Image (cartoon, coloured by chain):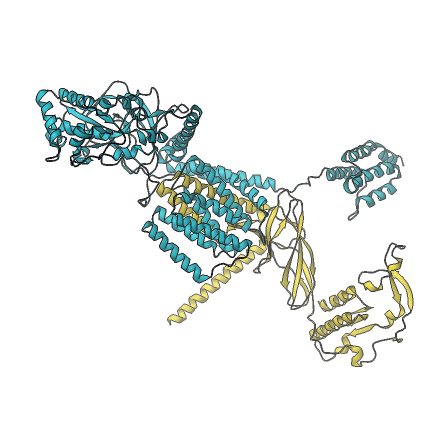
C-alpha cells in the first residue's frame, strides 16, 4: 500500500510540475508573439536573474559582512560594501549589454531531413556601447559561443536546429542571453523571430540505379552522340555552371554571357515520379532526392516530373535547389 | 594577467606570514607562469594532494593551530597558491576570483592605514578586470579594455559603497568572539607593572591615542593621562588588587575644565585614558569610572574608540576611606627590602605630618645622584633596596614603585598609577598625539582631609620629563629618537610627518572609528530615529543610486546616429532632396540615385553633380573635404525655391 501511495504522490507531483511548466510555457508564449525581423530588444523584454556563481558571490559577501561585523573592522565593511556595489553595478551592466540590440533573420541554410538546419542571424548594434559575449540558444538547446558586437557595428551568428521532417521548419523561440561582464547575473530576452528553414526530404540510400540505366524507356532523349554544337550566347542566370560562362566576352559586354550548346538540351535526364511505382509518397520523394543529388554530382542536366509540377531540365546549384524544394514541399 | 593580479593581492601578506609561505606562493606562481609560457607540466593529483597535506601540516607547525586569524590567513594563502596548480577551466578561474576578493578583506585584519583604501580600490579593479576577462568567450578581452571597464564599474560602485558604509546599521561588539590574535600586536600598558615593563612600552613608537581639545590645551605639566592603577605589591610586581572594584569614589571638581575628544587606538585592554581626572557625569556610553577613578570600557577595545570627556585637573578625590581600604593601600609583602623600610620609618619618626614624609622622600631622590634612564642596570631579589641604595638608576616605574613602597612603609596609604604623560602637538591638526613612548608611572598618596594626591617622584629626578617630554629627559635616548616625533629631524621632514599623522588622525577618526556611536550622530544629523528609519533611508538611497545608474546606462545604450559628420551631412542632403520629391529607391547607391535625379530634373543637374562629386570624393576618394560637401549642400538649399515654381507654372 505504501509504495502505491508513494507512487501516487510522485505522479501527482509530476503532474503538478508538468502543469506548472505548461502554464509557464503558455505565459512565455503569450509574452513572445511571433515578430517580424528585424526585432529590437526593448527594456521591458529583458529578464535578469542571478547565476549560480552570483549566488556564490552573494554568500561570499555575507561571510565578509559577518566577519566585518565581528571584527568591527571599518575597512572590511568598506570592502564588503564595495563588492556589494560592484555586484549591483554588474547587474545593471549585464542588463545594458542586451538592450537596444537589433536582431534580424539573415536566412537559413536548407538541410536534409535528419540533419541540422542552420539559421543565420544578424545582430545590429545601433548604439555607442560595445556589446560582448552574447549567446544565442533555442529553448532547451545548448548555447553557442559568444558573439561580440562593436558599437555602431554588426555581427553574424548561426544557430543549428535539428530538422526532423521535410517541408518548412519554423524557427522556435530564440533566447538571446548574456552574463557579461561579471557572470553574476544572466540577462536574457525571448525572441520569437519569424524565420523558417527549408528541409529537403532525406535522400534514400544509394543503390537504386538512375532511370537511364534502369532501361525504363529511354528517357534520355535526343542523344546525338557527343559532338557539341555551339548554339549561341545567352545572359547568365543564377545557377549556371561557372564553366559555361563565356569569359572572353566579359570585358566587351557588361553582363556575363553563357555559352549554349545544342547538346545541353539534348542530354537531359528526366527524373520521373511515375518511374517509382510500388513505393509510397515519402519513399518516392526520398528516391527522387537521391537521384537529384546523383545527377547534379555527375554534372548532367536533369528535369523533375512530379504529379503536380514539371521542372524542365537544367543543371547547376539553382536547378538542384529548385528540384529539392519542389520535393520538400510536395503535398504541403 | 591573473597571475600578476594574484601576486599583487598576495604581496602585503608576505610581511606578516612566515617566509616559507611566501616562498611557496612564489613557487606556485612561477610554476604556473612556466606552465602558461613554456608549457611546463602541471602536477598530478597525487602531488597536489601531498602538497595540500604538507601545506596544512606546515601551517600547523608554524602556528600550532589552523584556526585563528594569522593561521587562517596563512592557510588561505597556501590553499590559493595550491589552487593555481590545478587551474584548468573557466570554473577554476571563477573560484580563484572569489578567493582573491576574499583575500582583500584579510589584509585589513593587519593594517588599516589610509593607503589601505588605495590598495583596496586598486586590487578590486584588477580582480574585476580578471573576472571580466573570464566572462569573455575563447580568449579573454584585451587587458586594456577589461581594465577600463573594471575601472568604470568600480567607480560606479563607489557611491553605493559610501551610502552603505554610512547607513548600513552597525551593531557594537564581536558577534561570536575574536580569535586571541585578532588585530596586530600592539605594545601598550599592561594590567600589572614590574620594573622594565614600561621601558618595553616606551620603545614602541606607536600612537596610543590622539586628543583634540575644544578650547585651551592644558600645559604639559598637567597632561597626566590616567590609566591602570595598582594597589598590591608582591615584592616584584604591582597588580590592581582590591582597590579597583566597587563604586566610583566621591569626587569634587574645582578649577577650570578641559573638554576634549580622544581617538584611542585599539589596545585589546579596557582602559579609556582620561586627563587626570574626568568628570563623573557625562561619561561616554559603555564606560564606567572604577573605584580607582580610572575609566574602563565595558568591552575590550579591539577597535578604535572615539569618546568625549570633560576633565578637571584640580579635584578632591575620595576624602574619606574605610579602614579596610586604608589597610589595602598600606599592604606590603612580608620581609622584603628591609633597608627601604628602615629608611621610611626614619622619616616617619622625624616628621609627624604626612607632607613632611613626602617631602623627605622626594628630597632623597633629588639628592642621592639618581639618574633617569631607559637602560637601568638589572636589580637583584630585593629590587627596591637595590634600586634605592645601589644602582640609583631607573625609569619611571622604578621611581613610582619605590616611592609608593616607601610611603606605605611610612604608614601613608599610597598606590601606583600608570598612564601617559605629555603628548606632542601636531601643527597641522592642532591636536595632541600621545604615543606609547609617553607611557609613564606615578604615585598617589592619600592624605586625611585632602583625599588622593598625585605625586610624581620622577619629577624630583628629572623635571624635564614632565615639562619637555621624554625626549628631552633622556640624555641616552639615541636609540629612541626614531620613535619620537620631536623636531630633531629636519624641519620639512617634521612637517611632512605632522601632515601624515594628521591625515592618519582624520582617517582614524572618521573612517576607521566609524561604528555604532558615530552612526548615531549621522542619524541624528539626518533626523532619523531608530533602525527602521536608517534601513528605509539606506534602501531609498541605494535604490535611487541604482536607478540613476540604470538610467545613465540606458542613455549610454540608446540607439543613435553614427558619429560620422559626413554621413550626417549626406543625410541632410537626402532630406532636402526628399522635399524636392527626390528619394533614393531601396538599394540605390548615392551615385545611381544622383544620376537618376539629374535625369529627372535636368535643371538641378549641376548642383546634383557637385553634391555627388563632393560626397563620393570625401567619402571614398579623399579628393574632397567635408567643407566642399557643406558648400554643395548650400547650393541645393539656394535652388530650393524655383524648381517648385517651375513645376506649378508647368
Res B293 seen here: no
- The single residue placed furthest to the left in the displayed view is B349
Residue at the image position 87 percent from the left and 37 percent from the top: B606
Can you tell which quarter of the image residue B577 is in?
Answer: top right
Percent x, y of residue A302: 80, 71
Could you say which is closer to the camera, residue B358 or residue A196? B358
- The single residue placed furthest to the bottom in the displayed view is A215
The chain letter of the cyan chain reads B
Q: Colour of chain A?
A: yellow
Percent x, y of residue B488: 38, 25
Could you say which is closer to the camera, residue B345 or residue A223? B345
A116 relative to B376 in the view: left or right: right
How many numbered markers are drawn? 0
Image height check: is B282 above or below B548? above
B582 relative to A144 in the view: left or right: right
Percent x, y of residue A328: 71, 67
Image height check: is A187 above or below B540? below
Can you tell which quarter of the image residue B316 is in?
Answer: top left
Amino acid at each position: 500500500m505504501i509504495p502505491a501511495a508513494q507512487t501516487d504522490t510522485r505522479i501527482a507531483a509530476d503532474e503538478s510540475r508538468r502543469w506548472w511548466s505548461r502554464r509557464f510555457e503558455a505565459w512565455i508564449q503569450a509574452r513572445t508573439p511571433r515578430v517580424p525581423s528585424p526585432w529590437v530588444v526593448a527594456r521591458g523584454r529583458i529578464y535578469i536573474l542571478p547565476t549560480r556563481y552570483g549566488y556564490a558571490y552573494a554568500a561570499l559577501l555575507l561571510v565578509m559582512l559577518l566577519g566585518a561585523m565581528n571584527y568591527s573592522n571599518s575597512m572590511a565593511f568598506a570592502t564588503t560594501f564595495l563588492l556589494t556595489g560592484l555586484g549591483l553595478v554588474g547587474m545593471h551592466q549585464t542588463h545594458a549589454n542586451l538592450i537596444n540590440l537589433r536582431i534580424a533573420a539573415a536566412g537559413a541554410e536548407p538541410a536534409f531531413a535528419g540533419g541540422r538546419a542552420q539559421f543565420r542571424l544578424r545582430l545590429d548594434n545601433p548604439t555607442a556601447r560595445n556589446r560582448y559575449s552574447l549567446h544565442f540558444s533555442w529553448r532547451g538547446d545548448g548555447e553557442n559561443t559568444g558573439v561580440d558586437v562593436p558599437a555602431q557595428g554588426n555581427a553574424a551568428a548561426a544557430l543549428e536546429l535539428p530538422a526532423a521532417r521535410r517541408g518548412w521548419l519554423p524557427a522556435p523561440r530564440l533566447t538571446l542571453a548574456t552574463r557579461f561582464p561579471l557572470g553574476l547575473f544572466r540577462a536574457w530576452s525571448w525572441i520569437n523571430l519569424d524565420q523558417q528553414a527549408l528541409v529537403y526530404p532525406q535522400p534514400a540510400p544509394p543503390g537504386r540505379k538512375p532511370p537511364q540505366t534502369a532501361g525504363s524507356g529511354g528517357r534520355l532523349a535526343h542523344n546525338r552522340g557527343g559532338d557539341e554544337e555551339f548554339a549561341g550566347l545567352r545572359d547568365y542566370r543564377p545557377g549556371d555552371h561557372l564553366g559555361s560562362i563565356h569569359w572572353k566576352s566579359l570585358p566587351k559586354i557588361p553582363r556575363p554571357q553563357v555559352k549554349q550548346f545544342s547538346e545541353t538540351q539534348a542530354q537531359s535526364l528526366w527524373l520521373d515520379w511515375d518511374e517509382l511505382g510500388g513505393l509510397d509518397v515519402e519513399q518516392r520523394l526520398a528516391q527522387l532526392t537521391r537521384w537529384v543529388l546523383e545527377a547534379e554530382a555527375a554534372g548532367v542536366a536533369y528535369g523533375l516530373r512530379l504529379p503536380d509540377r514539371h521542372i524542365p531540365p537544367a543543371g547547376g546549384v539553382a536547378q538542384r535547389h529548385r528540384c529539392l524544394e519542389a520535393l520538400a514541399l510536395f503535398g504541403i | 594577467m591573473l597571475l600578476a593580479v594574484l601576486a599583487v593581492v598576495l604581496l602585503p601578506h608576505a610581511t606578516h606570514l612566515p617566509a616559507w609561505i611566501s616562498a611557496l606562493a612564489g613557487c606556485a606562481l612561477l610554476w604556473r607562469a612556466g606552465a602558461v609560457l613554456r608549457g611546463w607540466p602541471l602536477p598530478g593529483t597525487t602531488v597536489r594532494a601531498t602538497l595540500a597535506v604538507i601545506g596544512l601540516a606546515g601551517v600547523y607547525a608554524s602556528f600550532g593551530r589552523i584556526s585563528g586569524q594569522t593561521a587562517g590567513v596563512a592557510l588561505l594563502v597556501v590553499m590559493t597558491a595550491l589552487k593555481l596548480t590545478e587551474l584548468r577551466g573557466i570554473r577554476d578561474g571563477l573560484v580563484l576570483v572569489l578567493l582573491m576578493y576574499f583575500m582583500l578583506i584579510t589584509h585589513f585584519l593587519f593594517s588599516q592605514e589610509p593607503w589601505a583604501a588605495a590598495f583596496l580600490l586598486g586590487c578590486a579593479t584588477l580582480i574585476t578586470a580578471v573576472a571580466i576577462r573570464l566572462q569573455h568567450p575563447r580568449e579573454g578581452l584585451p587587458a586594456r579594455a577589461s581594465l577600463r571597464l573594471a575601472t568604470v564599474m568600480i567607480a560606479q560602485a563607489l557611491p553605493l559603497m559610501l551610502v552603505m558604509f554610512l547607513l548600513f546599521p552597525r551593531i557594537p561588539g564581536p558577534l561570536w568572539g575574536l580569535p586571541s590574535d585578532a588585530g596586530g600586536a600592539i605594545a601598550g600598558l599592561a594590567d600589572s607593572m614590574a620594573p622594565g615593563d614600561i621601558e618595553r612600552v616606551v620603545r614602541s613608537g606607536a600612537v596610543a591615542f590622539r586628543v583634540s581639545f575644544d578650547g585651551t590645551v592644558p600645559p604639559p605639566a598637567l597632561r597626566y593621562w590616567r590609566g591602570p592603577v595598582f594597589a598590591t605589591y608582591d615584592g616584584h610586581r604591582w597588580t590592581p588588587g582590591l582597590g579597583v572594584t566597587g563604586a566610583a569614589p566621591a569626587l569634587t571638581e574645582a578649577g577650570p575644565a578641559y573638554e576634549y575628544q580622544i581617538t584611542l587606538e585599539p589596545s585589546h585592554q579596557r582602559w579609556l585614558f582620561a586627563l587626570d581626572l574626568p568628570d563623573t557625569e557625562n561619561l561616554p556610553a559603555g564606560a564606567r569610572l572604577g573605584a580607582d577613578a580610572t575609566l574602563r570600557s565595558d568591552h575590550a577595545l579591539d577597535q578604535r574608540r572615539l569618546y568625549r570627556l570633560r576633565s578637571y585637573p584640580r579635584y578632591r578625590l575620595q576624602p574619606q576611606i574605610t579602614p579596610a581600604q586604608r589597610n589595602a593601600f598600606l599592604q606590603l609583602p612580608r620581609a622584603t627590602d628591609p633597608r627601604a623600610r628602615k629608611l621610611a620609618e626614619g622619616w616617619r619618626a622625624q616628621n609627624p605630618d604626612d607632607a613632611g614624609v613626602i617631602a623627605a622622600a622626594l628630597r632623597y631622590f633629588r639628592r642621592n645622584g639618581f639618574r633617569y634612564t631607559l637602560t637601568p642596570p638589572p636589580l637583584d631579589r630585593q629590587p627596591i633596596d637595590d634600586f634605592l641604595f645601589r644602582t640609583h638608576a631607573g625609569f619611571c616605574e622604578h621611581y613610582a614603585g619605590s616611592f609608593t613602597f616607601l610611603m606605605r612603609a611610612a604608614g601613608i596609604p599610597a598606590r601606583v598609577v600608570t598612564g601617559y604623560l605629555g603628548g606632542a602637538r601636531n601643527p597641522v591638526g592642532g591636536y595632541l598625539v600621545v604615543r606609547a613612548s609617553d607611557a609613564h608611572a606615578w604615585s598617589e598618596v592619600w592624605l586625611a582631609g585632602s583625599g588622593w594626591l598625585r605625586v610624581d617622584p620622577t619629577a624630583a629626578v628629572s623635571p624635564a620629563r614632565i615639562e619637555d617630554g621624554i625626549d628631552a629627559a633622556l640624555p641616552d635616548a639615541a636609540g629612541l629618537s626614531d620613535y619620537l616625533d620631536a623636531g630633531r629631524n629636519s624641519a620639512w621632514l617634521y612637517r611632512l610627518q605632522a601632515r601624515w599623522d594628521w591625515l592618519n588622525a582624520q582617517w582614524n577618526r572618521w573612517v576607521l572609528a566609524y561604528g555604532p556611536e558615530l552612526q548615531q550622530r549621522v542619524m541624528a544629523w539626518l533626523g532619523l530615529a531608530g533602525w527602521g528609519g536608517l534601513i528605509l533611508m539606506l534602501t531609498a538611497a541605494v535604490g535611487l543610486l541604482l536607478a540613476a545608474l540604470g538610467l545613465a546606462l540606458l542613455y549610454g545604450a540608446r540607439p543613435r546616429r553614427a558619429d560620422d559628420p559626413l554621413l550626417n551631412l549626406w543625410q541632410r542632403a537626402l532630406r532636402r532632396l526628399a522635399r524636392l520629391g527626390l528619394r533614393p529607391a531601396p538599394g540605390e547607391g548615392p551615385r545611381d540615385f544622383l544620376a537618376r535625379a539629374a535625369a529627372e530634373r535636368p535643371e538641378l543637374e549641376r548642383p546634383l553633380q557637385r553634391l555627388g562629386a563632393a560626397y563620393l570624393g570625401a567619402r571614398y576618394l579623399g579628393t574632397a573635404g567635408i567643407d566642399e560637401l557643406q558648400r554643395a549642400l548650400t547650393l541645393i538649399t539656394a535652388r530650393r525655391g524655383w524648381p517648385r515654381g517651375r513645376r506649378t507654372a508647368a
